[in-house]
Amino acid sequence: MSSVIITGAGSGIGASTALHLDRLGWQVFAGVHDQGEDSEILARQSSDRMTVLPLDVTDRSSVEAFVATVEKEVEPPGLTAVVNNAGEGIAGPLETLPIDELRHQFEVNVIGLVRVTQQALPLLRRGPGGRVVFVGSMGGLVAVQFAGAYHASKYAVEAIGDAWRQELAPDGIHVAIVEPGPISTPLWSKAAHTLDRLPPNERYQERLDKFRETLQRQGKEGASPQSIAELIEHAVSADRPKTRYAGGFAATVVPKVRRLLPDRLYDKLARRASA
């Protein structure tokens, strides 16, 4: 039986992927940060093959306990794949963003995925070739104002994915990066709420109010998380998986157009799009 670890499985892309692979007969270990309603909903919708476990990717002991449980319960021949989906979006001008917020952004989106993957690699090596999937973002290829912390973390995911793909190739472990465009998930509304934690600043306030509306609109009008779940399915199960998967029209087109534009022209278009 194929088996998979999925982080950030309480909602959005993570929940959709967990349920999608469960329906396909996978043994799913779903890591959920917020215990309670998210865990209960996931458990009710899944089969008995799914194990829902608490997981805080920023906490070493939490990750170690999670992987230890997987090691005890995984079916032979061992773990097939790790899907690093846990992520958070923190918004705000870099000038006024508290350093602790920037640090937390990287703890969740970057250091957390490295921590989980490091712990899971021995289980992946037990099987006949494993898969590691990093859920990045179109925002790891292009950047807009007031999301600098988020973009920086996703650019880092791109570099980590590239380096790990090279390092793990001799072991027969394939690494892929999934790069969604705007997806209808709670991440956008949560990112909008992070603006409330910023200190007041008249210089940015009018633009931030418009940016908040943009975030909320993307959360409502984005594509379905199921479309990304299907890309992840290909990444963990295909005989010849891709190294990168663009999630949607915007994720396919915008980075290509960005590479063709002079910086100042792109900046002007990006400011309009994000306000």
Image: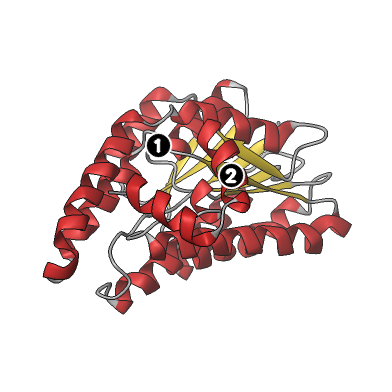
Considering the image in quadrants, where does the N terminus appear?
top right
Badge 1 marks a residue whose secondary structure is helix
Res 63 visible? no
Figure quadrant of residue 233: top right
Q: What residue type is labelled 1?
A: Gly
Name the mark on residue 12: 1
Residue visible at 37% across and 38% down?
11
Res 267 visible? yes
Question: How dense is the environment of label 2, judged by Cα within 10 Å: few (below 14), some, or many (20 and up)?
Answer: few
Badge 2 marks a residue whose secondary structure is helix
CA distance separating discs 1 and 2: 28 Å
Mark 2 = which residue?
257
Residue 184 in the image: above or below residue 82: above
Q: Position of residue 53 (x, y in %)?
A: 44, 47
Q: Position of residue 77 (x, y in %)?
A: 77, 41
Query: Relative to 28, is 144 on the left or the right?
Result: left
Looking at marks 1 and 2 on the same chain, the residue that comes earlier in the sequence is marked by: 1
Q: Where is residue 62 in the image (x, y as percent from the top left)?
A: 44, 62
Q: Position of residue 119 (x, y in %)?
A: 62, 63
Residue 214 in the image: above or below residue 64: above
Residue visible at 24% across and 74% down?
96
Name the mark on residue 252: none
Q: Are marks 1 and 2 in contact (CB under 8 Å)?
A: no
Q: Which amino acid does label 2 sit on?
A: Val
Question: How dense is the environment of label 1, judged by Cα within 10 Å: few (below 14), some, or many (20 and up)?
Answer: many
